Every structure is written in structure tokens, then in C-alpha cells.
Image: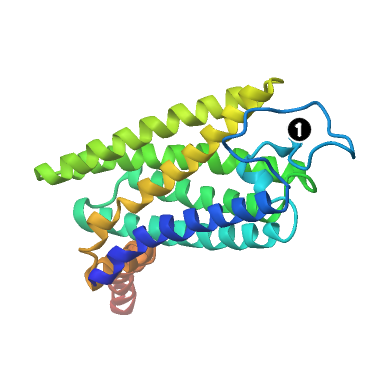
Amino acid sequence: MPAWGILPVTLPAVTITGMWIVYAMALSNNHICPVHNWSYNQSCGLDGPISCCTLDHIPLVSKCGTFPPESCFFSLICSLGSFMVMLVGLLRYAHVIECCGPSLLNTLGLAAGWICAAGLTMVGNFQVDYAKVLHYIGAGVAFPTSMLFVFLQSVLTYRMAKTRGHYWTGHLRSILSALAFITLVFSGVFFVQESFVLQHVAALCEWIFIINVLVFYGTFTFEFGAISTDTFLVLLKASQAPKSYKSDSSTASTPHGHSHSEGLAMV
């Protein structure tokens, strides 16, 4: 099914485009200030300029989707993105099992991807100005687990590599992982500062981090082009492994039960 190779590219294409649409809507409604703006004021009076920027107008991704109508579209993008993250993570899990068999790193990668999707759903549906605690919990879950996911997948790429192209894919993912880690750290450090400039840098780092992670998901198109029906059969067998183990155990114990009953009959 070569069509599965389109899925990883669709995730960043749809999500990044949707995020910039949300940003444009928020900007047109004067809910945020543009990313190229570096001038902020402590407050804005009624007789001040329309484009007056305060701490509440810093273009963080969450701020872009705080007020309607862009908040509705922001929730839609986050919900759709979380679903696609879960689907890509599951297919990646099945593909690794098909190529290399069961692996703890692969299982951890699947768990990290799905937990990230849950956090992303919370971020999109609980706006920061109206449900700050739940929003920050979602962000605190989504950001670290997405970083863990890209790190684990980079390691798995090198472990699965057999050709020069596979190693180049691993190099690309390692670079994206390193950039994601740097921007995530800077975003967290600068976000808690009181300086307008540093908080603006935090917003830019947040945008770069999210786009970087989404581009990382897009690199799975190299492997997903080889996904076939056998991949889904492998996933089905992996999910039924505990059941088959129990049935094998009960089958193995059956002959002993028959021999015991036959012995009693002979007595």
C-alpha cells in the first residue's frame, strides 16, 4: 500500500497550514501581535494605537487560539493532529515489529506518541485564558513526550539501518531531534522570564519546536511507502500474543488431564 506513505506528509502539511491560518485569524482580529514585532508596552490605553502590544499579545501558539473565532479552528486542528499522531505512531510501531521484532524502545515510542496526542488534545480544547491549569497540564504532557518520541525514533532508525539511505535518514532525524531539544529548552527557560523580549523569543522557539517535530513526523514517509497488508497482520498478531500464550498453556495442560482421567478409569 504505497498510499500509506502520504500519511506522514499529510500530518505536517495539514497541521502547519492550519496553525498559520489560526495565527493569521488572531492577527487580523488584533488578538496577538506579529512575530516580527519586538516592541511591547506595559499597558495600552483606549486612546492608544490599535497595534499596541502588551504581554497578553505575545504570539505564543496557545495565545493564537485563545479567542473566537480562531479558538474553534485551533481546537479542530489540535484534535485532528492528535488523531493523526496516534495513527502514525501505531503504523510506525507495526513497521518496526515487522522489520526487527518486538522491542522495548519501540513500545516506549508508541506510548510516548499516544501520550503526546492526549496532551495535544487537552491543549487544543482548554484555552489558556479560560482553563489555564488544564491547558498547562496538557502542554506539560505533550511537549516532553513529543521530545521523547523523536529521540526514541532516531535511535530506532539507526538500529534498523541497513543501507546508506537509512543512515542518512537517521542523520536527518538526529539533527531534527537536536534542534527540537534546543528550542524546547530555550522556550521553557525564556517563557518564565519577565522580559518582553525573552518571552517573545520563547514564542519563536515554541513555533520552531512544533514545526520541527511535525517535520520529523513527515520523514516517516520513507518507511511508510513499504507498508503492506503483512504489516497489519504483524500488528494483529502482536495484539493477540497474550491470548495465544494462554491458549497454548491450556492446550499443553490438556494431555496431562486426559492421562490423569484415564488412570482413574483404569483403577
Residue marked by disc 1: 54
Instruction: Give the structural element (helix, strand or loop) at label 1.
Output: loop
Identity of the residue drawn at 22% across and 43% down? 169
The image shows residue 237 at horizontal and vertical percentages of 31, 66
Extreme residue in the bottom direction: 265
Q: Is residue 4 left or right of residue 22?
A: left
Q: Is residue 219 above or below residue 6?
A: above
For the C terminus, give its image quadrant.
bottom left
Q: Quadrant of residue 260?
A: bottom left
CA neighbours of label 1 inside 10 A, class few (<14), some (14 to 19), many (20+): some
Identity of the residue drawn at 72% across and 52% down? 126
Identify the image's colour scheme: rainbow, by chain, secondary structure or one colour.
rainbow
Residue 74 vs residue 123, the one in the foreground: 74
Residue 245 vs residue 5, the one in the foreground: 5
Q: Is residue 78 left or right of residue 64?
A: left
The image shows residue 173 at horizontal and vertical percentages of 30, 40
Q: Quadrant of residue 63?
A: top right
Q: Quadrant of residue 105?
A: top left
Q: Amino acid at mark 1?
A: Thr
Identity of the residue drawn at 90% across and 40% down? 46
Q: Is residue 150 above or below residue 124?
A: above
The image shows residue 18 at horizontal and vertical percentages of 53, 58
Identity of the residue drawn at 33% across and 43% down? 153
